[in-house]
């Protein structure tokens, strides 16, 4: 059995928190550049140019690309032949988040509970989803998820009779309603199926797939491309100032569901679509 030290996880998580906020991923950066070639509105082009400049400055000066440095969300794959030595995995992640946000001078955005609204002062707790997988590796996927885009996300339990047309209609209505408030250009994460809570998880999970990578099922990949086209015809544009780049990408994850159900979740991600992955062996 492979042993992975608690302290090593803390250090890796600390680095992920800082790097995700300073370095926009290559996939998102390339999507900005590509959108600059296709954007039809002059204002839209200007905004995209500013977003590219902003990402360059954040990287060069090692400052956060946005004042909202996000909720730290982790999707963790734990190999069943891997043992965390020296403490609990979730504690190691939270300690890493505390160090990363503290030492990296990143804004602390978490409150103890929604009733007292008192800031926890260290950006914990992180939201941690754990999956047990084969092997002896520990894989951490992390995103620093912006609050504005999260606020405009939604879930609805549709009826099976609403069909795929109802699903598409609902997704478009959520993006439309979000308008500029989710800080477009967006990455639109969609969950279809599962049950109430699983559907929201699927939408979040879809956002961890790098931009430009389509779903492996050709029918789902086609749905992603169709939705992308329809969303970009809404005219919301970069930062909601009009244009043909409302979404940089659309991701769909789907799973089996009850015969009586058709759950759909739309988890919006803003242009600061920050994600990091590390594999510990
Ligand atoms: S939603 Fe995203 S771009 Fe908008 S303020 Fe939050 S992190 Fe920044």
Image: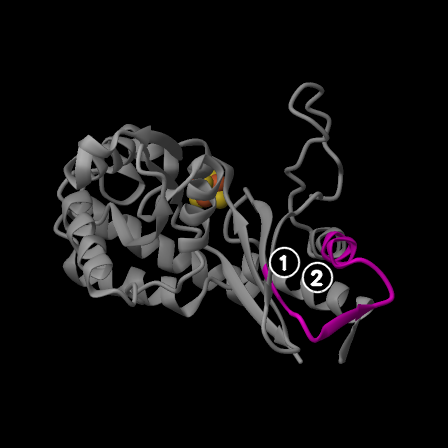
Q: Nearer the viewer, residue 234 or 137?
A: 137
Q: Is residue 105 left or right of residue 91?
A: left
Q: Position of residue 249 (x, y in %)?
A: 28, 55
How many residues crowd around disc 1 within 10 Å: few (fewer than 14), some, or many (20 or more)?
many
| Residue drawn where x is 72% and y is 31% of the image | 119
Question: On screen, 116 above or below 154?
Answer: above
Question: Which quarter of the image is occupied by the N terminus?
Answer: bottom right
Question: On screen, 21 above or below 192?
Answer: below
Q: Position of residue 178 (x, y in %)?
A: 32, 31
Question: Which quarter of the image is occupied by the C terminus?
Answer: bottom right
Q: Which residue reaches farthest right?
A: 86
Residue at which label 2 appears: 14
Task: Tell me whether circle 2 and circle 1 mark residues in contact (CB < 8 Å).
Answer: yes
Q: Nearer the viewer, residue 243 or 145?
A: 145
Colour theme: one colour
Q: Secondary structure at mark 2?
A: helix
Q: Which residues are magenta?
A: 76-96
**Across the whole image, how many numbered discs are drawn on residues?**
2
Q: Position of residue 232 (x, y in %)?
A: 18, 46
Q: Quadrant of residue 162?
A: top left
Question: On screen, 20 above or below 46?
Answer: below
Q: Nearer the viewer, residue 129 or 163?
A: 163
How many residues crowd around disc 2 within 10 Å: few (fewer than 14), some, or many (20 or more)?
many
Q: Which residue reaches farthest front?
A: 259
Q: Position of residue 227 (x, y in %)?
A: 19, 48
Q: Is residue 49 left or right of residue 207?
A: left
Residue at which label 1 appears: 17
Asked if one can make out residue 125 in the rendered structure from this viewpoint, the answer is yes
Q: Which residue reaches farthest top?
A: 115
| Residue drawn where x is 49% and y is 38% of the image | 197
């Amino acid at each position: 059995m492979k042993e992975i030290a608690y302290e090593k996880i803390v250090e890796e998580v600390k680095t992920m928190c800082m790097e995700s906020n300073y370095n926009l991923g290559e996939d998102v950066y390339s999507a900005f550049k590509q959108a600059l070639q296709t954007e039809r509105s002059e204002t839209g082009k200007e905004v995209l140019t500013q977003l590219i400049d902003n990402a360059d400055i954040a990287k060069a000066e090692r400052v956060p690309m946005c004042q909202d440095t996000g909720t730290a969300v982790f999707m963790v794959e734990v190999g069943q032949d891997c043992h965390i030595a020296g403490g609990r995995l979730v504690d190691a992640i939270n300690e890493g988040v505390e160090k990363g946000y503290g030492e990296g001078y990143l804004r602390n955005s978490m409150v103890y509970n929604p009733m007292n609204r008192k800031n926890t002062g260290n950006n914990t707790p992180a939201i941690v989803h754990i999956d047990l997988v084969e092997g002896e590796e520990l894989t951490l996927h992390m995103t620093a998820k912006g609050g504005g885009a999260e606020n405009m996300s939604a879930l609805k339990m549709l009826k099976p009779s609403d069909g795929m047309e109802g699903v598409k209609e609902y997704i478009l209505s959520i993006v439309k309603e979000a308008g500029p408030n989710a800080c477009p250009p967006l990455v639109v994460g969609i969950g279809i199926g599962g049950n109430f809570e699983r559907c929201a998880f699927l939408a979040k999970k879809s956002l961890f797939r790098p931009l430009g990578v389509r779903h492996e099922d050709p029918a789902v990949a086609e749905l992603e491309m169709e939705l992308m086209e329809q969303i970009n015809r809404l005219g919301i544009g970069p930062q909601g100032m009009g244009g043909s780049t409302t979404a940089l990408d659309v991701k769909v994850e789907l799973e089996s569901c009850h015969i009586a159900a058709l759950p759909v979740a739309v988890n919006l991600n803003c242009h600061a679509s920050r994600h990091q992955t590390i594999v510990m062996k």
